[in-house]
Image (spheres, rainbow, N blue to C red):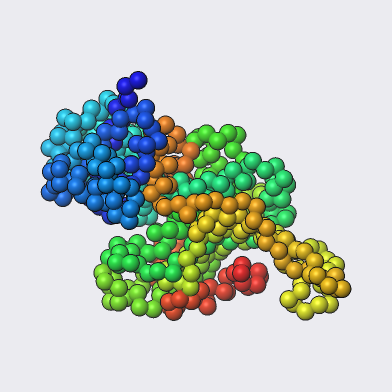
Amino acid sequence: MTPRQLPFVLFGATGDLARRMLLPALLSVRERHPEYRLDIVGVAGSRYDDEQFRAYVVEVLTKDKRCSRQDAKAFAATIRYLSGDYHDQALFERLAAIVSPEERPIVYLAIPPNLFEVVVEHLAAAGFAEHARVMVEKPFGRNLADAQRLSGVLARYFLPEQVYRIDHFLGKEAVQNLLVFRFANSILEPLWNRNYVSRIELSMLESFGVEGRGSFYDNVGVIRDVVQNHLLQLLTLLLMEPPLAMSGHDLTDQRTKVLQAIRPIRPDDAVLAQYRGYRLEPGVAEDSTTPTYAAIRLEVNSWRWAGVPVFVRAGKGLRETRTEAVVEFRRPPTLIFGSGESEEHQPEPNAFVFHFKPDGRIELLMQTKVPGPRLISRPTTLTVASSDDSARSDDAYAQLIDDVVRDDHTRFATQESVEAAWRIVEPILDAPAETTYVVGTDGPREASRLLGDVKGWYR
């Protein structure tokens, strides 16, 4: 059988995201779909011709031994390249001459937000509005008003089912495992609510700084960079109601309802901080007040979660790198074991810990007896699931591109969910860092005031 043609247009083809994630992901997508002939066209301002861009692709794919030079050359040989100014309609007419809009091309916009509107309008003018599928990279706007304006631009030319708003976290294997773990195990359902859960904690901690992205990060900050998108999307998977089916519509509806139930953050429920030395990073303003750390207490006004404190924290320059969620259950109503003992022998509450990074483990903390004559307990960690998702981030992008090939919206954000997320963070979106913290620590001590009733962050 002759493979069907699948046009894929990558705007921003020479940018950082394409180099690190998208080109390796496209190689994987091609291998997943032998029934298609992936016809890739890179578009960017860099002045390459086809052969120069193909050599660039080979260099990208063979770096760190991601694939052999032979495989990289075979892949790159099928790629074409267009150089031009995104503000020039002639560039888009040239694109339409080599990629037929009627073939339902996938158009990936890996471009700065300030170019989004002009590229969408030129695509529509070149005839791509009726059939193209458009993948939009985060951040989707800078605030609620900006997100609504960009959604209006998309809605002017494309139907909702043609638009795929990306959060690559939703393509990660460990994140998908959370969804299966919750809804494929009926034993959890009676416990997954305010009657049994005492708190929920979601952390995205990074030991490194801005890594040469100072000018970008200083214009974004921790709330726009990871809280409004990655962490709130992860939180929806922890808190959502069971969907009727794992279809795009049912799943995204339930995720959106979670975001709509979260009250906008009050300034007193957030601690924003900046690591010491951040202002010395290249590209960062000398008087910058951009937060690199945020700790937030959220309230979820839903029947299932009302009254359960939800804590979210994220930051750079911290003691370690890990992304995890903790669902902690209530303590036993009376202390049968350990009564009268020292604090170290008081039973700890049970908890599920979802390690999204670095290794995808799911652990259950239980209590077991300490060997010996006394009837006292100690915490024991049971690994109930694991994943080899030491997975590179480009694997998540490959999954999401694969979803678009199959017209599956399950792992993508909707306009409603994006706007709901912006409403949550809007009150603190442009708030300055109120304190500083030392690199290599757990963050500012001031964050502990948010957890006074739960004895600090989960260990």
Image quarter of residue 130? top left
| Residue 244 placement (x, y as % from top left) | 60, 34
* Residue 157 showing in the rendered view: no
Q: Residue at x 52, y 34 (%)?
A: 247
Judge whether 393 appears above or below 445 on screen: above
Quadrant housing the C terminus: bottom right
Quadrant housing the N terminus: top left
Q: Nearer the viewer, residue 459 or 50?
A: 50
- Left or right of 358 on screen, residue 79: left
- Left or right of 319 on screen, residue 181: right
Of all residues, the one furthest to the right in this rendering is 373
| Residue 301 placement (x, y as % from top left) | 61, 53
Q: Residue at x 29, y 49 (%)?
A: 61
Q: How many marks?
A: 0
Q: Nearer the viewer, residue 104 or 14?
A: 14
Q: Residue at x 26, y 71 (%)?
A: 282
| Residue 256 placement (x, y as % from top left) | 51, 44
Q: Nearer the viewer, residue 267 or 63?
A: 63
